[in-house]
Image: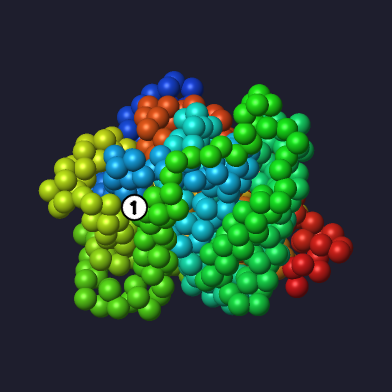
Amino acid sequence: MWSQHYDPFGNPVLSTIAAALPVVVLLAALAFFHIKAHIAALLGLACALAVAIVVFSMPVTTAFSAALYGAANGLLPIGWIILNVIFLYQLTERKGYFRVLRESITGITTDRRLQLLLVAFCFGAFFEGAGGFGTPVAVTGAMLIGLGFQPLAASGLSLIANTAPVAFGALGAPLIALASVTGLDLLHLSGMVGRQLPFFSVLVPAWLICAFCGFRGATAIWPAILVAGLTFAIPQYLISNFHGPWLVDIGAAICSMLCLTLFLRVWKPKDKWPATTAAEPEVPTHANSRGEVFRAWMPWLILSVLVVLWGVPQWKKSLDEVSLVKIEWPGLHLKVQKIPPVVAEAKPEAAIYNLNWLSATGSGIFIAAVLAGLVMGYKLKALAAVYWDTLKLLRYSLATIAAMLALGYTTRYSGLDTTLGLAFAHTGPLYPFFGTLLGWLGVALTGSDTASNVLFGGLQKTTSEQLGLNPILMASANSSGGVMGKMIDAQSIVVASTATKWYGHEGEILRYVFFHSLALAALVGLLVTLQAYVYPFTLLAP
């Protein structure tokens, strides 16, 4: 049994700097030195292993075991999702169905701003609620490329849009995990997050359009932005507060998508984006019949149904009963012990790898892709050929995701991320602001709001109680602040570059979204601070 220690130098500043080195190496390699993502991830992993072993005195075998455990979790479930989403995209692209789908969307509107609201915000939120774990960015990034967006815009804007729904993603998984590690009431946590994020569900669509075309371009379509935001935010508040976290994103996304589509049938912006000549029709006609349009959407309808089905707890449980293999990870399970003040009393950390090959979301997507392929007229041999081509296409991306998760798990089990978290916990009265940024940091490091809540949920509860703050507020702030870190975590950036076929440009995507991520996280922190101290915002945090 090896016990984590969070101040190896006996100097919090030096220890925090050492703990931050792997993150600095990774981000610098991507953003400033333009190193390919898989190599940058390996450099960050090497630095994390060195700091964990040399500075934090983690046993060598335990450190490498943690890295392998992270790599396994990177390939399943995350890599498995991306591989099969891109497989489905390749199938539709080769048959010409994706072209028909694109034309059907432009049949609603040719305005890129409005397409962005429909696809990146509304459709992406639906997939976040149903599957999470990279699914929405993979799907919407590919769709935006098909609609004619440039790779950087398609990647970056998909990441910005995939923020406000994240805390309720994958049928409420982040909050379910948060309730589990903190012992706080799930419905109270759901309600608290539901009184924080709706503000940003209205703001994010406007922010998204401003990032795309500037303030003037956004003001020209403000009625549509308001419809998309409000019809998402209101159901988000109502479902999270009066039902629970499970169906928040799915219900809100469907409501927003339907309302925006109906609104666009009766309202058109005065200007056009991109600008067109007066002679060009605002909504072009196309030669596709209703039957062809329906067949083009059918693969994505099949995907939606199966992703939702695979997210239903009862269905997952039934699949797990016949397929789940639990592996106590050798050299790591119960070999690492967290100690106070992160936990009330020292306890060993579990490391159980769930080989849920059938109940994983990616398996549902794979089955959907195969079914859709058969419906589109593919033979099994042709399906296998496309799958092999997809695997070759994604080989570096899958390696990058494995290395990124290896880095994240190394920092988690060595205590490097906890050292960073404790630095935030020393901010006293400013803790509501910096505690929110701690959630942002957690997602940026781990790539998952669920993982961030597991990592820092207990710390948020303990610190808030010591400072006399509401633990429900600060535990919820960890999840709400974390959603803004989703756009800069390395695995999401790799998913975006893969979906848009813009390999090797991960550093450019990171630079594109970093300011947006930090600014929005700071705004969430400001809201949480107001809820902690300032009337009438305190009424939102009973």
Residue lying furthest left in this view? 381
Residue 467 appears in which quarter of the rendering?
bottom right
- Residue 118 position, x and y percent, is 58, 48
In the picture, measured across the screen, residue 64 lies left or right of residue 131, that is left
User: Callout 1: 10 Å neighbours few (<14), some, many (20+)?
Assistant: many
434 horizontally vs 530: left or right: left
In the rendered image, the residue lying farthest to the top is 33
- Residue 149 x/y as whole percent: 51, 32
Check the picture and name the quadrant holding the N terminus: bottom left
Q: Amino acid at mark 1?
A: Ile
Q: Nearer the viewer, residue 280 or 380?
A: 280
The x, y position of residue 353, in whole percent, is 28, 62
Residue under label 1, please give it: 81
For the point 68% across and 60% down, which residue is it? 231
Residue at horizontal 39 percent and vertical 50 percent from the top: 292
- Which residue does the image show at 45% across and 35% down from the upper left? 145
Which secondary structure lies at badge 1? helix
Q: How is the image coloured?
A: rainbow
Please indicate, yes or no, whether residue 534 appears anywhere in the rendered image.
yes
